Amino acid sequence: MSNQAPVLPKSLPGAAIIGEAALAASDGATLETVNPATGRRLGLLPACDVADVDKAVAAARATFEAGHWRNLAPRARGRMLLKLADAMEAHAEELAVLETLDSGKPISDTRAIDLPLTITSLRYYGETVDKIYGEVGPGGHGKLSYAVHDPLGVIGAIVPWNFPLLMAMWKIAPAIAMGNSMVLKPSELTSLSILRVAELALEVGIPAGVLNVITGYGHTAGAALALHNDVDMITFTGSGPVGRQLMRYSADSNLKRVSLELGGKSPHIVLADAPDLDAAAEAAAWGIFYNQGQVCTAGSRLLVQREIHDDFVARVIKVAETIVPGDPLDPATRLGAVVSEKQMQSVLTRIARAQQDGAGLRLGGAQVRKDSGGYFLSPTVFDTVSNDSALAREEVFGPVLAVIPFDTPDDALRLANDTDYGLASGVWTGNVNTAHRFARDLRAGMVWVNGWDACDVTMPFGGFKQSGFGRDRSLHALYKYADLKSVTISFS
């Protein structure tokens, strides 16, 4: 199936899912969803606003208070999540095509990576939620003290456009597994696949109101959700400026909890004693060009020890030259379209600025496939980049690699940690002592040694510094969506 041409769906999701109903916006407002590979409109979606957010939150609250979901035994909730995972697997080709049409990702990636990882995440929480234990305290005679995890209530989730389904499921699965209800707002650029999942959730029997999906813009629907006094938590993946605004909204409303994953400027370090330079070069190239560079953990700063610099950069460029943008619906395509014209122009502006700042352009740097009408960029490599430059300090979120030479391991650590961010990092070395030293001293939430993006749903995902706080994935995400209640019973 993975090498077959995709079959386009006969119809596309076109309504918000609130409770058990598929609804238009209360005022009839709509927004366009556009195919990034062609620049043409796919369809119209509701542009939800305050009234629609109020409906969705009311539906989530009513379901939570009624207890139809939160009072189920954890194992029973887990079984429902597994049923949804089975339904998603049965509709995997449909969901992969929706994801590709909406985001510009290659169909080979949505089939082989996005959908399997999304389903795996859902199954992980379906299988683990009944293995979360409370605590019994060391009470004295005549007392029994214990602590339990209570669901928070109504969770508001705002998710990005770079991994529409996967980022949504990292939040949906642990939140509803713990008994919460959710109102989710996807990016206005990429809403189709998660709307279809919300329909499937109702079809498999997850109670109406547990998962509500509203479509709309961040400054309207997103702001209304974050300011709502009946939302107990906002969980967000996206940009730093929006994350800061969400914290202000929390303070301005009901002091709701906030969990933020805000991206990074991740250092990918290659030492002269790296055990396999070809493997490191492959990882360095795909660490930035995968998903058109639109990855918060992208290894956008490639730090290379000077004594191997020229040879290693040549190896990276050799790999990058094989990564050619193409039609995302062609199973042979390895690099798709950037998500929107606005994002493409933002990346091109940063490329022009890097050239003005004196960085050496070694590859790419331009829009390609213009005759398609889509938003395609070639893999771009800048060499001898200063770590003080905008290219090295600001998140580009596109297929643009900044190569920074260094002399010693101490220099590498200093450069790697000289950033406002702290999401991911990696080092290639054949010395076990060096590996442990870098793992200890790199200021990042994730450190990968002799590999890139090497962990899975069982490990926590999140960062230090301005990369935000709170964790997705792993058991830690379950606890994030719960309050800890202490109970003491006195008896004679």
Image (tube, rainbow, N blue to C red):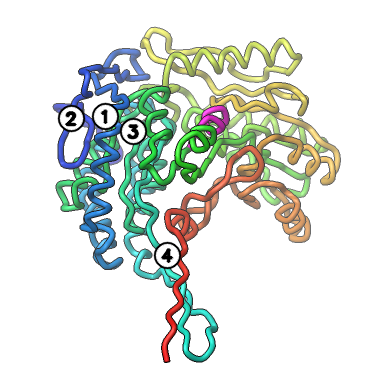
User: In the rendering, which numbered label is found on residue 107?
Assistant: 3
Q: Which secondary structure, mark 1? A: helix
Quadrant of the image for the C terminus?
bottom left
Query: x, y (%) of residue 336?
Result: 42, 25
Q: Amino acid at mark 4?
A: His
Of mark 4 and mark 1, the one earlier in the sequence is 1
* Region of the chain picked out in magenta, as a range: 237-246
Instruction: Tell me the residue at 63%/32% (across/down).
Output: 300
Q: Residue furthest front?
A: 492
Q: CA distance from mark 2 to mark 1?
A: 9 Å
Q: CA distance from mark 2 to mark 4?
A: 34 Å
Residue 406 visible in the snapshot: yes
Q: CA distance from mark 4 to mark 1?
A: 31 Å
Query: x, y (%) of residue 1?
Result: 25, 41
Of mark 2 and mark 3, the one earlier in the sequence is 2
Report the predominant secondary structure element of the magenta stretch.
helix
User: In the rendering, which numbered label is found on residue 149?
Assistant: 4
Q: Is residue 243 magenta?
A: yes
Q: Which secondary structure, mark 3? A: helix
Of mark 2 and mark 1, the one earlier in the sequence is 2
Q: Amino acid at mark 3?
A: Ile
Q: CA distance from mark 2 to mark 3?
A: 29 Å
- Mark 4 nearby-residue class (10 Å; few <14, some 14–19, many ≥20): some
3 vs 4, front mark: 4
Q: Amino acid at mark 1?
A: Asp
Query: x, y (%) of residue 51?
Result: 27, 27
Instruction: Tell me the residue at 15%/27% (across/down).
Output: 11
Q: Nearer the viewer, residue 391 or 476?
A: 476
Location of residue 380 by image quarter: top right
- Relative height, residue 27 to residue 426 (above, below): above
**Is mark 2 in CB contact (under 8 Å) with mark 1?**
yes
